[in-house]
Image (spheres, helix red, strand yellow):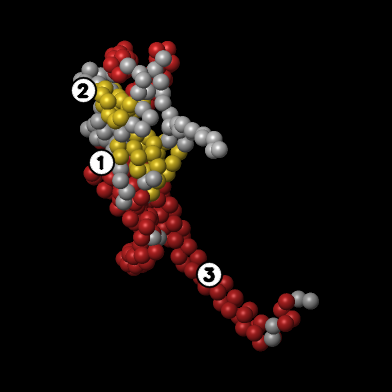
Amino acid sequence: MPLLSFVPAQATSQLAEKLAEFREYVITYVQAEGAAFALKLLAAVVIFLIGKWLAGVLSRLTGRMMNRAKVDQMLVRFAVNIIYIVLLTVVIIAALDELGVETTTLTAVLAAAGFAIGMALQGSLGNFASGVLLIVFRPFKLGDFVEAGGTSGIVEEIQIFSTVLRTPDNRRVIVPNGAITSDTITNNSANPTRRIDLVIGCGYDDNLREVKAYLESVLADDDRVLSDPEPFVAVGELGASSIDFLVRPWVNAEDYFAAKCDLTERIKLGFDERGFKFPFPSRDVYMHQAG
C-alpha cells in the first residue's frame, strides 16, 4: 500500500504546493544568479587550491631557512606544522568570503566554537601548551635518549600535541606532551660522557689487593674507558657475605650500554680464571641431637 495513502489529502496538497514553490525559486535563482554563483564557486575553489599550495610552499621555505640558520630540527618541525595550519585557516576563510559567506560572523562563530571546544578539550590544549614549553626550554633535542612520561627512548619528533619516542627494541611510542612536562625528565644524552656504576663483590677469603688490581687492569685494558675523569675502584662496603667494590669508569655516552655489558662479562670471566669468589647469601645450619 503506498505510503501517501496514510497522509490526509489536504496535507498532501500542501506538500505538493511547497515543493512546487521551492522548484520555482531554484529555477528563478539559477536563471538570475546561476552564472555569478558558478563563477564565485570556481573562484573559491581556485583560491583554496592555490592557497593550500602556497601554504605548503611557505611552510617548507620557512623550514629550509631555519635549517640554513642551523636551528634545532625539533624546533623546525614544530614551527613548520604551526605555520601550515595557520596559513591554511586563512585560506579557508578567504575562500568562504569569496562565496559570499559573512566571514565576520563566521569568525565570531568560530571563536565561540573554539572556546566551547577548548573547554571540552582542556587536556589537548594543555598538551599543545606543553609542546610549546618543550620547544622553548628544550630539555632535550632530536636523537637524545630520554626517560620521560613513564617511558624511555630516543626522541624522534615533537608534534603539536605529543612527542614520538623510539624504544631500544625499535617500538614507536607516542607520549602526550603534558605527561612529559608534568613528570621528571631524565636526559641521558645531555652530556658527552657518562659514568658506569658497577658493584662487584668478592669473598672475605680472597686477596683484597689482587682483586682491586685485577679490576683496575680490566678498566685500563678497555679503550672505551676514559682517563679523564679517572676511573674509580675502591672498597665500598663490608657486606654480610661479601666485600663490595665500587667500580666507576667514565665512557662516552654512546658507548655506555655496550661498555657496561662488556666490562661485567670480562670481570666475571676473570674472577673464574683467578679463583675469586662471587659470594651469595648463605646460612649454616647446625643440627644437635637431643638425647
Residue at image coords 32%, 16%: 207
Foreground label between 1 and 2:
2
- Decide: is 34 above or below 50: below
| Residue 85 seen from this side | no
Q: Position of residue 32 (x, y in %)?
A: 46, 67
> Residue pushed farthest right?
1
Whether tag 2 and tag 3 are in contact, CB under 8 A, the answer is no
Q: Residue 163: image x %, image y %?
A: 37, 43
Residue type for callout 2: Pro
Within-10-Å neighbours for mark 3: few <14, some 14–19, many 20+:
few
Q: Residue at x 37, y 46 (%)?
A: 149
Q: Position of residue 68 (x, y in %)?
A: 25, 31
- Given the image, on which type of amino acid does mark 3 rest? Val
Q: Residue at point 62% right, 83% down?
A: 14
- Assign a secondary structure to mark 2: loop
Q: Quadrant of the C terminus?
A: top right
- Residue 198 percent location from the top left of the image: 33, 27
Q: Nearer the viewer, residue 136 or 260?
A: 260
Name the residue tied to disc 3: 26
What secondary structure is marked by label 3? helix
Which residue is under mark 1? 138
Q: Which residue is mark 2?
A: 229
Seen in the picture, residue 141 relative to 182 is either above or below; the reply is above
Q: Say which of 225 and 16 sits in front.
A: 225
